[in-house]
Image (tube, coloured by chain):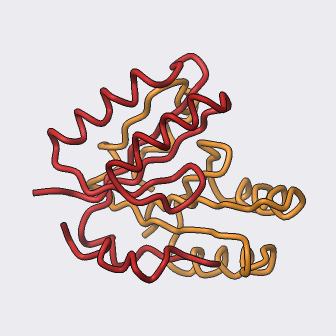
Chain colours: A orange, B red
């Protein structure tokens, strides 16, 4: 079964930032400039973490992975122009 | 009882970005440029959301609030120069 993960990153180097975003676009929904929401099984999370580890410089780039349990997904709140309506299906439990 | 919340924001206007960060620094731990982790009770979350709503332009600024249930807190993973060791107490359940 897949779980929703929030992946947030701080990458100052423009090219590495671009590569990480491009990789993540194949895995989930970009909800902010440096924040993605991805539905992932445990093996898929491992694969994604390995792929991203190859793209960054761990001395200065930072990526955080937050699991969001199903009970909390409906409690996500936004202020401002939130995710496009077409992404509502994104919140159906994976 | 307080719960851990991840608060992530996209604010292009420098001064509003600064004000939101300064407000959040009074509530929790900055873990990335635009990401904070805050231990909040329900009333405190309401108060914080109201304070931040006053500081942004909801037409173009975006703030997301993610509840992180206690079971998920130990599963947070980072890659790169993560939160300073002195912040380990931050992850003791509030």
Please tell me which residue is depicted at 80% across the width and 59% down the height of the picture. Answer: A17
Horizontal placement of B87 versus B45: left or right? right
Q: Is residue B82 above or below residue B17?
A: below
Image quadrant in which you'd find residue B90: bottom left
The residue sitting at 50% across, 73% down in the picture is B83
- Position in image of residue A44 (x %, y %): 60, 75
- Establish if A48 lies above or below B50: below
Residue B51, how many percent across, how many down?
A: 33, 29
Residue placed furthest toward the left: B1
Left or right, B83 with respect to B53, comes to: right
The quadrant in which the N terminus of chain A is found is: bottom left
- Is residue B6 shown left or right of residue B11? left
Q: Residue at x 36, y 80 (%)?
A: B88
Q: Position of residue A67 (x, y in %)?
A: 42, 66
Q: Residue furthest right?
A: A15
Q: Nearer the viewer, residue B52 or A48?
A: B52
- Residue A29, compared with residue A62, is above or below; it is above
Toward which corner of the image does residue B59 lie, by quadrant? top right
Instruction: Tell me residue A89's x, y (percent).
Output: 50, 39
Along the line of sight, which residue is nearer the eye, A43 or B78? B78
Q: Is B60 on the left or on the right of B88, as rendered?
A: right
Q: Give the position of the C terminus of chain A as an image quadrant.
A: bottom left
Q: From this view, report whether residue B91 is shown above or below residue A39.
A: below
Q: How many marks?
A: 0
Pick the residue in front: B93 or A49: B93
Residue at the spot 52% in from the left edge and 30% down from the top edge: A82
């Amino acid at each position: 079964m897949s779980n929703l993960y929030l992946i947030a990153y701080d990458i100052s180097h423009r090219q590495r930032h671009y590569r990480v975003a491009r990789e993540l676009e194949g895995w989930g929904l970009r909800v902010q400039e440096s924040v993605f929401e991805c539905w992932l099984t445990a093996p898929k999370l491992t694969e994604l973490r390995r792929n991203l580890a190859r793209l960054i410089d761990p001395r200065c780039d930072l990526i955080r992975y937050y699991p969001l349990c199903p009970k909390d997904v409906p409690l996500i709140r936004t202020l401002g122009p939130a995710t496009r309506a077409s992404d509502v299906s994104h919140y159906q439990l994976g």
